[in-house]
Structures are given as structure tokens and as C-alpha cells.
Image (cartoon, helix red, strand yellow):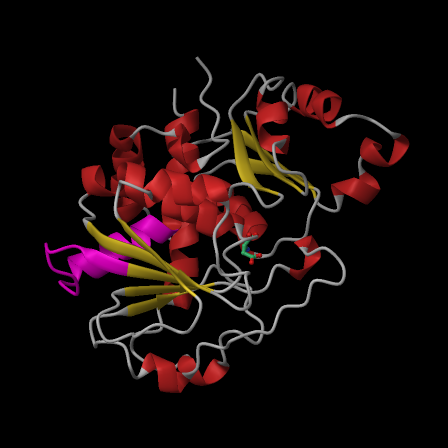
Amino acid sequence: MVTHITKATSLSPERLKQVLQSAGRMDARNSCTMLPNRIVALLFYEASTRTRLSFESATKRLGGNTLTMSEAKQFSSAAKGETLEDTVRVISGYADCIVLRHGSAGAAERAASVSQVPLINAGDGNNEHPTQAYLDIFTILKAYGQKRFTSEGIKILFWGDNENSRTVRSLAKLLVSHGPALGIQIRSIEFFGPNGFGVPPGDVSEALAGACNLMLHTKPPRLEDVDVVYVTRPQRERHQSGKKLEVVPFTLQLAHQLPRRAIIMHPLPRTDELPMEVDGDPRAWYFTQSDHGLLVRMALIWHLLQK
Ligand code: ASP
């Protein structure tokens, strides 16, 4: 049966554990021949830097090849009126795997329903971004590996536009459903963001309620016992016009209030919500986090495509 990754929980905890273990063994600098002659199609209807290029690099590092269609909205047959389903059905005859980014929530499920090869959701509107959640979890496990966190469980604070961020949705849900099986104990998950944008969507709160301590803050909370701060940018491209968001930056002054063991994460790209002054702080892990994207995507492609 073909495995599609449309949401973070598409992989069982056991299978995700295997992928993350493989990611730890991948070599980001040297190419290998683990997947010779396999072709991964990158079908991107929305802007991307890290996700597209790390998938491309991952495929090539494994010895495979890529077919790339970026700006697909404008340059694929979508511009002539072709449906996503038809495009995906056709490309699945040309490639061994499809990585899809699309502006509409639910697009990945629709595409997977017609794809003959594994389809990986690389972000569908404000819905999900599973591979980002995998590399985020991998990063948190690395911090465990450095003995930054204890077995008491970690407190995670999502800081930013939690209402519209697909990375927040995927990571928060994955943490409660798969975290314990992967060795991540959760003390609490908290959310803060500017004027209403900090509250996550209903399905996220529902998934978390009962599974962990859940707190929604309307003012910046105390940071002294936070283990992971996950900052996100205002998702302006998804805001209804007229809805104004005042960014509350996570400044160096705030970073200094965190315990030394804490890590600051961000899926990137960042805008004003995470000033560059934070980059030199030893708790700034966001570039390490983006480096992990290559390893995790190499491992995922390998798991999905090996014979
Ligand atoms: N790169 C991430 C995404 O595609 C985060 C962001 O754009 O804010 O969702």
C-alpha cells in the first residue's frame, strides 16, 4: 500500500521513530547511492525556500533526481484551468514520489486520493506541514540528547500567529499524539500571540485538551521555566484584509529571561517577530533546526521509496 504523508500523524509513532533514527545517521555533506535513479517531483504552488530546496538536496544526496515545478499556479497547466487532481494523477506517472505545496487547506488529501506514488504534504494553506513537524521533533530530541531537558517533562510556548500557522498545528498535535512514544514528555503547552492571533484553532485546542496542561495567554507569560519557545511570523498572506496584527517581538531581553537549558525555535522565514540580535544567544536553535530539515527529509524519502 502506498503511504501518503498528508498530516503529521500520517506516520505511526513507531514508523516516525524509525525515520528520525535514520535521520540521525544521514550525512548532510556527502552524497550516497541509497536511492539510485529514483525521481521525486516537487510541485509547488506557493512560495518556498527551505522546504523545496531541502527536499531537492535530500533527493540528490540520496542519489536520486528531481523534477521541479515551482510557481505551479502560473506555469503549470493550472493556468489553463487543469484541476489539482488531474495534474497530480499525471505527475504520479512520471515520478516515484510527489512533494506538494499548495495554498488551499485540504489540497494534500485531495492530491493523495489520486496519486499512485507517495505524496508528501509540504504545506497546504493554513492546514498542515508534516515534515516541518518531523524536523521540529528531531530538534527537540537533539536537545534531550544534550541533556538540556529532564524526565519531568517540558514546557513549550508557542509565540506568534498561532491561529494561522500550519507549523504550529502540525507540531502541537504531533507532540501530544506521538511525543511520549518518542521520549518527549510534555509538562504543558502554552500559547501567546498578539491580539487574538495567539489562540490556536479549535481542532488544536481540542486535540490538546486532556492530553496535557494547556494554557492560553493574552499577555506575555513568565519565561523562567519554559523549555522550548516556538516563535512564528504573522501569516499575513492568510489574514483577512482589515484584520491587523501588532507583532510582539521575541527580543534578546526576553531570551535572557529563559532558563539556560531552553531552546528558541522558529520554522523560518522570520520577519520582525524574531530580531537578529537573538541569533548570538546560545539558546537560538533555529538555524540548527533548519539544517535538520535536510536530514529528516532524506530519511523520510528513503523510508518511503526504498524497495
Ligand atoms: N515555512 C513555514 C511554512 O511554510 C513557516 C512560515 O512560512 O511561516 O509554513
Q: Residue furthest left?
A: 151
Q: Indicate whether 70 appears above or below 270.
A: above
| Residue nearest the observer in this picture, 92 or 136 | 136
- Regarding residue 297, the answer to whether it shows in the image is no
Q: Residue at x 55, y 67 (%)?
A: 195
- Regarding residue 125, the answer to whether it shows in the image is yes
Q: Indicate whether 238 appears above or below 19.
A: below
Q: Is residue 81 left or right of residue 231?
A: right
- How many numbered marks are there? 0
Looking at the rendered image, the quarter that the C terminus falls into is: top left
Q: Residue furthest front?
A: 218
Quarter of the rendered image showing ligand 1: bottom right
Which quarter of the picture shows residue 3?
top left
Q: Residue at x 86, y 36 (%)?
A: 79
Instruction: Find residue 264 and report its horizontal and vertical position in percent.
Output: 35, 69
| Residue nearest the observer in this picture, 146 or 247 | 247
Looking at the rendered image, the quarter that the N terminus falls into is: top left
Q: Residue furthest top?
A: 1
Q: Residue furthest right?
A: 80
Q: Residue at x 57, y 23 (%)?
A: 112
Which quarter of the picture shows residue 67?
top right
Residue 151 lies within the magenta run: yes
Q: Residue at x 28, y 38 (%)?
A: 178
Instruction: Find residue 115 and report its horizontal and vertical position in percent.
Output: 60, 19
Residue 15 lies within the magenta run: no
Instruction: Find residue 51 and report its horizontal and vertical position in percent.
Output: 54, 50
Instruction: Find residue 276 and report its horizontal and vertical position in percent.
Output: 49, 81
The residue segment tinted magenta is: 136-155
